[in-house]
Image (cartoon, rainbow, N blue to C red):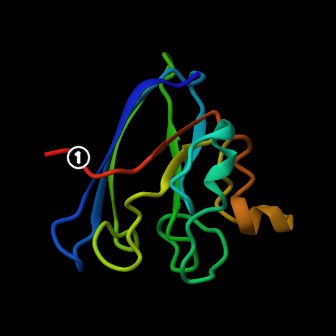
């Protein structure tokens, strides 16, 4: 069960990349787990009401470094021997500002590894076969 964790997004202007920083606790040790931004800002019903990956351009699923990917595709984070993960990355496609903003959508941590759209079945091109959704939170701006 994922415990108290933080995922922070920062973008300085509409053309700047978004910086993603995470400190995630309470996963299985030494695993890779998929994490994605999903379409809806609804984390009820066991995170299933978050809908599909956020995909305003109608592309197939892919790795964060791929041109052909959903805006919500953020690949995997790797846990340590205690089941924790910290990291930082930048994403040029994900935006906090403008019409394709991810603000108000749901960030989902998946139970499995995202195969980045490289699997042999059709589901890999939609979801990366990252499995169930044990944890989620809607992405809201900080309160001032």
Q: Is residue 118 visible?
A: no
Residue 81: give x, y in percent of width and height. Answer: 50, 18
Relative depth, front residue between 10 and 140: 140
Please name the residue that numbered disc 1 is placed on: 142
Q: Is residue 56 above or below residue 3?
A: below
The residue at 31%/66% (across/down) is: 96
Relative depth, front residue between 58 and 19: 58
Q: Residue furthest top?
A: 82
Residue 85: give x, y in percent of width and height. Answer: 42, 31
Q: Is residue 95 above or below residue 127?
A: below
Residue 18: give x, y in percent of width and height. Answer: 29, 63
Q: Is residue 141 above or below residue 17?
A: above
The residue at 62%/82% (across/down) is: 58
Q: Is residue 94 visible?
A: yes
Q: Viewed as shown, does residue 17 lie left or right of 65?
A: left
Q: Residue furthest bottom?
A: 57
Near mark 1 (Cα within 10 A), the count class, few <14, some 14-19 or many ≥20, is: few
Where is the N terminus found, in terms of image quarters?
top right
User: How many numbered badges does the structure rendering display?
Assistant: 1
The residue at 54%/78% (across/down) is: 56
């Amino acid at each position: 069960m994922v415990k108290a964790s933080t995922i922070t997004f920062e973008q300085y202007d509409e053309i700047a990349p978004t910086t993603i920083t995470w400190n995630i606790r309470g996963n299985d040790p030494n695993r890779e787990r998929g994490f994605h931004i999903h379409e809806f800002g609804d984390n009820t019903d066991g995170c299933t009401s978050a809908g599909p990956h956020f995909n305003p351009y109608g592309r197939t699923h892919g790795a964060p470094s791929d041109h052909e990917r959903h805006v919500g595709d953020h690949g995997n984070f790797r846990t340590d021997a205690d089941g924790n993960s910290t990291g930082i990355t930048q994403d040029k496609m994900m935006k906090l500002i403008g019409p394709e903003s991810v603000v108000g959508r749901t960030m989902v941590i998946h139970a499995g590894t995202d195969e980045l759209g490289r699997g042999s079945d059709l589901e890999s091109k939609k979801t990366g076969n990252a499995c169930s959704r044990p944890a989620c939170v809607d992405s809201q701006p900080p309160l001032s």
